[in-house]
């Protein structure tokens, strides 16, 4: 729950800031691949993070829907960039199995 609050504050800050020049675009020229589960309610978080990254200049690809085990493994292997939804206690074992600490 605390992690969700931190992410919410971070995303609010990102979305609230204005892009003034190319120097303010840390993601310019960098592509990112969002990944999410097949639970449709998670699409909102994924699109919110994607929009924030686009405002920072990142080239955000269309989200791919996969099972959580595949999501964590894909991120660990470099085939995906982020998973916007993480249920910390529920997904801790999957995160560890994919190489997380």
Image (spheres, rainbow, N blue to C red):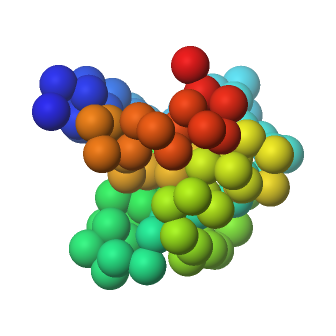
Q: How many callouts does the rendering have?
A: 0
Say if 55 sits above or below 25 in the image: below
Q: Is residue 58 visible?
A: no
In terms of image quadrants, where is residue 30? top right
Residue at (46%, 38%) from the top-left corner? 93
Residue at (50%, 60%) from the top-left corner? 68
Quadrant containing the C terminus in the rendered view: top right
Residue at (69%, 50%) from the top-left corner? 73
Q: Residue furthest top?
A: 101
Residue at (46%, 70%) from the top-left corner? 37
Q: Nearer the viewer, residue 32 or 89?
A: 89
Lateral position of residue 79 relative to residue 52, left or right: right
Q: Nearer the viewer, residue 46 or 59?
A: 46
Residue 58 percent location from the top left of the image: 68, 48
Residue 59 percent location from the top left of the image: 72, 57
Quadrant containing the N terminus in the rendered view: top left
Residue 41 percent location from the top left of the image: 26, 74
Say if 80 sits above or below 26 in the image: below
Residue 89 percent location from the top left of the image: 28, 36
Lateral position of residue 50 relative to residue 61, left or right: left
Q: Nearer the viewer, residue 101 or 38?
A: 101
Q: Nearer the viewer, residue 34 or 48?
A: 34
Q: Is residue 32 visible?
A: yes
């Amino acid at each position: 729950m605390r992690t969700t609050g931190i992410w919410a504050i971070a995303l609010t800050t990102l979305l609230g800031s204005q892009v003034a020049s190319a120097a303010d675009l840390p993601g310019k020229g960098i592509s990112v691949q969002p990944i999410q589960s097949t639970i449709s309610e998670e699409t909102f978080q994924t699109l919110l993070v994607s929009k924030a990254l686009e405002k920072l200049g990142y080239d955000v690809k269309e989200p791919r829907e996969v099972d959580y085990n595949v999501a964590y493994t894909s991120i660990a292997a470099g085939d995906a960039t982020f998973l916007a939804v993480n249920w910390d206690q529920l997904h801790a074992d999957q995160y560890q199995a994919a190489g997380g600490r």
